[in-house]
Amino acid sequence: MVVLAVLEHDAGAIGDVAGQVLSFGAAYAAEAGMPLHAVVAGPGGETAAEQAGAFGVATLHVAEHDGLRSYAPQAIARSVVELMSRLSPAAVIGAGSERGNEVLAHVGAITELPLAANCIEVAPGEAAQLTRIRWGGSLLEEARMRGAIKLLTLAPHSFAARPAAAAQPAVERFTPALSDADLAVRVIERAQTQTGDGVSLASANVVVSGGRGAGSAAGFAPIEELAGLLGAAVGCSRAVTIAGWRPHTDQVGQTGTKIAPEIYIACGISGATQHMAGCKGAKRILAVNTDPEVLNNADFDYAVIGDLHEVLPAISAELRKAGVT
Amino acid sequence: MNILVCIKRVPVTGGRIVLRDDEQAIETRHLGFAISPHEECGVEEAVRLIEQNGGQSTVLTLGPPEAEEQIRDAMAIGIDRGILLEVSEEWDAQATAAAIVAAVQAERAAGTEYDLIFFGNESADTGNYQVGIRVAHALGWPCVTGLKKIALADGRARCEQAIAEDRDVYEVALPAVVTVKEGLNLPRYPSVPGRLRAKKKPIDRRTPDARPAALERLRLKLPPGEGKQTEILGRGPEAAPAVVELLRQIGVI
């Protein structure tokens, strides 16, 4: 028996999230007294092997097939299932990323096994007890999963990536048997969207957002002014995108963009769970709101009680006075 | 063409979530309910595609009898008919998918063949990321997930999926299952005549066959580390210097 980690990679480069999956997998395998194996699909297996070795992977399986040159979720899942029939793993672990969840859901569908998505704690065992996130992390669920093979994905950043001794894993290549149906869904091209000259919301160091309290599309003027001075990205709440004041690409939230800035300035935003699920990665949150009651809704680090249309121009003026332009 | 949209009734949680005493569900006595956000966009897209191509749209949900409210909401913006798979408690992803597959097969037996089935990429509440994919496998159909755009031509669907700041493009033959994300479109508000028409549209109520949950929910709990103290920097424009001082301290100016 082994523990099998399914790794996402980009031309062999495995990211932080794959490191988290491997670190968790190594600990899980050690507790279960089994070796850790990992699988990657598509070109780049050699490069992935070098990185995977640092996390204690004993054997890296590389699925090679012409159909795996671009991302093809069902084909990757079929490759994983083929490997599972040879290795009979106790657990198959993937990342709780969009693609990790997608591939493992296909594995679950093919094998008719349950899948626990976005786990933050798992105790190995025949009836594995686990904790997973609901509501984008605003609520936790404790659950029990039965069956010989556990399919799990890990919520991103719930486990630290801890490289251990650098050892080269054994590399085993295989060519999975893939049907036309397995390859029917695959990426045929990557379309670049507009090369925005603005600051990217997901990676911005500072984000200034407006909610219903902005009042209208035009009500975002003081938010944009302050964001401009701080080199910040402009965000908004779901109420704003539903009203059509801002595009959905500006939305911070469970169904929008997840952000992780040094400081998040949330103006006229009530702090609903839908919104907070998108900004809990922020190091600090400053709320600007007329209603002190919102402080009971969510965990804000700082607050200014007042109308954003008065408070924000004053902050911008103060910044200019301090020489920020 | 025939389009099926699968939706989920979820509470509108607002601020902090409160659990029921038995820790098995959210306390919803004081909450309203809505269609889970991604699926709201699935409903809008189905209505648009039927407006363009002709045919019939159907909305399906597995939920309590009160989920009729969300079916009527979908009908109010143009969905033609509804299927309510009535259950008394939350079902896990596998049981939900099996019930939907059985409903699609029953529709086929009754003469309705679907060309396209919409799901949300993941539900707002349980976030299992798998029901649509499981249904697609059971039907032997392709499944494209996380759509931000879909265009139909010549029996094929060209689908765009958001990937970081770019879009990955897929093309699949119909029939297909697609899972969508908010931002696919801006759902319209229901009109008053739309609401009135919705009241007269047909809903089939069925009781799906239950099966034991493979992933057994033990209890729900709130994440730790909540309830930190907020530092009030001031009131009104007079707070500006304190804000600028904070920005300076943390090194962003």
Image (cartoon, grey):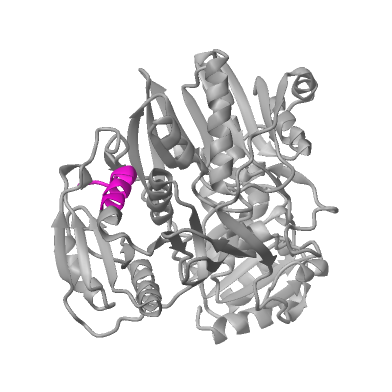
Q: Is residue A248 placed above or below B99 in the rendered structure?
A: below
Answer left or right for B105 relative to B229: left
Q: Quadrant of residue B109?
A: top right
Magenta residues: mostly which secondary structure? Answer: helix
Residue farthest to the right? B30
Q: State the residue at coordinates (56%, 53%).
A: B127
The reply, left or right, for residue A308 in relation to residue B175 is: right
| Residue in the image at 73% along x and 77% along y | B227
Front in this rendered view, residue B120 or B104 = B104
- Residue B88 percent location from the top left of the image: 74, 43
The residue at 39%/75% (across/down) is A32
Q: Position of residue A53 (x, y in %)?
A: 22, 75
B82 left or right of A43? right
Quarter of the rendering occupied by the N terminus of chain A: bottom left
Residue A55 percent location from the top left of the image: 29, 77
- Asked if B238 appears above or below A236 in the picture, the reply is below
Q: Position of residue B168 (x, y in %)?
A: 34, 43
Q: Quick one: A227 or B82, which is closer to the camera?
A: B82
Q: Is A77 in the magenta?
A: yes
Q: Visible in this render: residue B51? A: no
**Region rendered in magenta:** A69-82
Q: Is residue A95 left or right of residue A11?
A: right
Q: Total number of numbered labels?
A: 0
Name which residue lies at 48% across and 26% down.
B116
**In the image, residue B54 lies in the stretch drawn in magenta:** no
